Image: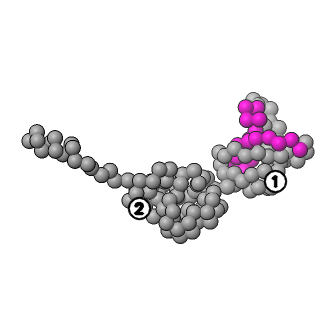
């Protein structure tokens, strides 16, 4: 019995790992659906390992068929496009200042982007909110 246990511990065992790969070319800015990806048995560092991690996410750079879906190459779908006019909001306690700005990058909910205030031409950094407004705080500037 002990010999069998010792032998079992000495034999190499294979850990089963899965990775998500593209079933066809996924263009940048496209949103991932179930038809776009499949799970394969492979251990690929940095790749998504489940459908839930990728479904509904936006592709940042083109992913070719058969290539892994890297977690750093997907993110929330963009609500704000580059050069789009957005509302900037700075809020501190009861004070709220709203201004118009021009987005200098694309961004999804929770992402940090740079925006140029159209009145002062100052560039600020803010977080894209679920309503598409960019919230600016002193800590982010």
- Give neighbour class at mark 1: few <14, some 14-19, many 20+ (Cα, 10 Å): some
Give the residue at x 56% y 66%.
64
- Quarter of the picture holding the C terminus: top right
Circle 1 sits in a helix, a strand or a loop, which is it?
strand
**How far across and down, in percent of the image, does residue 18 sit?**
40, 56
Q: Residue furthest bottom?
A: 24
Residue interval drawn in magenta: 121-141
Mark 1 or 2: in front is 2
Which residue is painted at 83% across and 46% down in the image? 116
Residue 40 image label: 2
Inspect this view and state whether residue 10 appears.
Answer: yes
Left or right of 89 in this view: 44: left
Going by the picture, which residue comes out furthest to the left? 1
> Can you name the residue that lies furthest to the top here?
93
- The picture places residue 19, in percent across and down from the top left corner, at 44, 57
Q: Helix, strand, or loop for circle 2?
A: strand
- Image point (47%, 59%), residue name: 20
Q: Where is residue 44? Give x, y as percent.
A: 45, 54
> Residue 55: which numbered mark, if any?
none
Question: Does 107 appear in magenta?
Answer: no
- Residue 78 percent location from the top left of the image: 67, 55
Among the 4 quarters of the image, the one containing residue 5: top left
Gap in angstroms between the C-alphas marked 1 and 2: 42 Å
Q: Can you see residue 30?
A: no
In this view, the residue in front, 7 or 41, is 7
| Residue drawn at point x = 79 percent, y = 55 percent | 84
User: Mark 1 = which residue?
Assistant: 85
Front-most of 8 and 84? Answer: 8
| C-beta proximity under 8 Å, tags 1 and 2 | no
Mark 2 crowdedness (10 Å alpha carbons): few <14, some 14-19, many ≥20: some
Name the quadrant containing residue 58.
bottom right
**Residue 134 counted in the magenta span:** yes
């Amino acid at each position: 019995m002990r010999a069998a246990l010792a032998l079992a511990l000495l034999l190499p065992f294979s850990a089963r790992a899965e990775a998500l790969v593209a079933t066809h070319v996924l263009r940048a800015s496209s949103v991932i659906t179930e038809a776009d990806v499949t799970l394969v048995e492979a251990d690929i560092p940095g790749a998504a390992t489940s459908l839930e991690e990728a479904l509904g996410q936006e592709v940042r750079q083109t992913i070719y068929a058969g290539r892994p879906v890297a977690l750093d190459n997907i993110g929330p779908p963009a609500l704000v496009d580059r050069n789009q006019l957005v509302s900037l909001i700075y809020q501190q306690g009861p004070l709220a200042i709203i201004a118009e700005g021009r987005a200098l990058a694309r961004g999804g909910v929770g992402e940090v982007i740079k925006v140029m205030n159209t009145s002062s031409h100052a560039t600020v950094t803010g977080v894209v909110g679920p309503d598409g407004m960019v919230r600016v705080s002193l800590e982010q500037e």
